[in-house]
Image: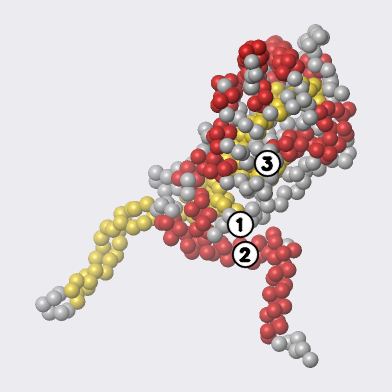
Amino acid sequence: MIDLGHPLLKILAALLVLILWRHWAPVSYWYALVFPRKALWLRWSWRHVASGCGLTKKRRRWWFTVIPNLVASSGVVRVRRRFQRVEVDTKPWMGLPRPTRNGFRVTFHLLDGQIPDDYAKICERLAHAWRIEAVRVVDSRPGRVTLQGITRDPLTHVAPATPPDEPSGGWRTEDLLRPVVGVLETGAAWRMDFRLIPHWMNAGATQSGKSNLINALIVGLAPQPVALVGFDLKGGVELSAYADRLTALATTREECLNLLSDLIAVMGARMLACRRYGVRDIWQLRDACRPIPVVVLVDELAELYLTADKAEKDQVTRTATALLRIAQLGRAFGIHLVLSGQRIGSDLGPGVTALRAQIGGRVCHRVNDPETAVMTLGDLDPDALVAARSIAPELPGVAVITGSDGRWYRARSGYVSTDAAEHAATAYAHLTPSWNQVAASGLGHELPATDDTPELAA
């Protein structure tokens, strides 16, 4: 007969409870058991970690020393005690670690001569010293810097983004042009905030998650009162599935050029209207007379710049000029760009390089060539290039992005199938504005209809 009171059985039962607790409720397990031990260890080992990472400073301080002097003639050791100034290693002051769902946050007081970038450069060293996944600088203010330690990678499993079932709901007024498309490595929601960063570049190889990000954008923007415009030089095979929610769709080079010309005309009309109302951009207008925001989705940007003969060279030049003009002036007048492509390099011409300089938002998935990563992230941070090149093929949707705070983060878009995005486009087809509505924009300045006005794609 088994003795249930045996100490060994009690120990095994306790271990089983801990294993089940860790498996079924990892968040509470982290808060209750793991974090207190981790916080104590961080505080206890900080002096050694700071010294190993080069964060300590030499300072001269008064010190009460005991210096033994050996007298060889008599063999007697004399001890002399006195105050003297010595050099000691001073570590940055560490605040109390604060737990989060996926790790912890801790604030440090900077020593004289230190800046937050000194901590950003050694994040990988700190991650190895603290035995965690990653460390990121998440906040800074004069004299202080806040680091976030990530113990469990939240990008391993990301909940799929699904469209709301009710066509009448699904978004709040403050979420206008701020769709949630995934999760950041810090555990926070990944928002593509077009109000803050008006234009985005989305680069990635085949099966890297580039198209999935477009699907997530369709799901996030479909219930909002915005106009979606598509450029798809693959013959429309990528964006035609969402034609019910697209105000216009261009599938040939000539259609793209005409649609860009119409967008510039709309931008010019809004510019004159803002001048007439005495405001700098459309967001300073009253809600009743604010024009409809336009989000332009470009699939395969390289197709707009490739030329097969001299006859297409003039069209490419005009296309590049129109895109650059929209990128430079579109933010103030509610026209936003999302430029996607597998290959984005300087070999496409100076127009791409000039356009890149106007794009503040960068999303770099796994790429086949290093130049595309350099083109997307090269002007931000060398560490971002290293992170982008190390994205594994078995993690589609993972990308290196620019945050609203100017730093780079790893992020992953929630999986959205083409069927789910098509369902969202169909469910919200009644919200699709006509081109005349986009051109009029409630400003009392309607553009005259022309033969080049793009029609809603069937």
Q: Horizontal and vertical percent for residue 150?
A: 60, 53
Residues at marks 1 and 2, CA–CA distance in whole angstroms: 10 Å
**Horizontal relation, residue 265 to residue 365: left or right:** right
The kind of residue on which mark 3 rests is: Ser
Q: Is residue 34 above or below residue 122?
A: below
The residue carrying pointer 1 sits among few (fewer than 14), some (14 to 19) or many (20 or more) residues within 10 Å by Cα, namely many
Tell me the distance, in whole angstroms, between the alpha carbons under discs 3 and 1. 25 Å
Q: Which residue is drawn at 51% across and 49% down?
A: 123
Tell me which numbered mark, 1 or 2, is placed earlier along the sequence. 2
User: On screen, 414 above or below 43?
Assistant: above
Residue closer to the observer: 113 or 165 = 165
**x and y, in percent, of residue 283 in the image:** 70, 23
Tell me the mark number nearer the camera, choosing from 3 and 1: 3
- Quadrant in which the N terminus appears: bottom right
In this figure, which residue is indicated by the disc labeled 2? 34
Depth order, front residue of 232/423: 232
> Which residue is painted at 19% across and 71% down in the image?
69
- 177 sits left or right of 136 in the view: right
Q: Which of the two marks, 3 or 2, is nearer to us in this view?
A: 3
What residue would you read off at disc 3? Answer: 208
Residue 151 is marked as 1
Residue at screen point 64% across, 56% down: 152
Residue 440 visible in the displayed image: no
Would you say 289 lies left or right of 385 here? Answer: right
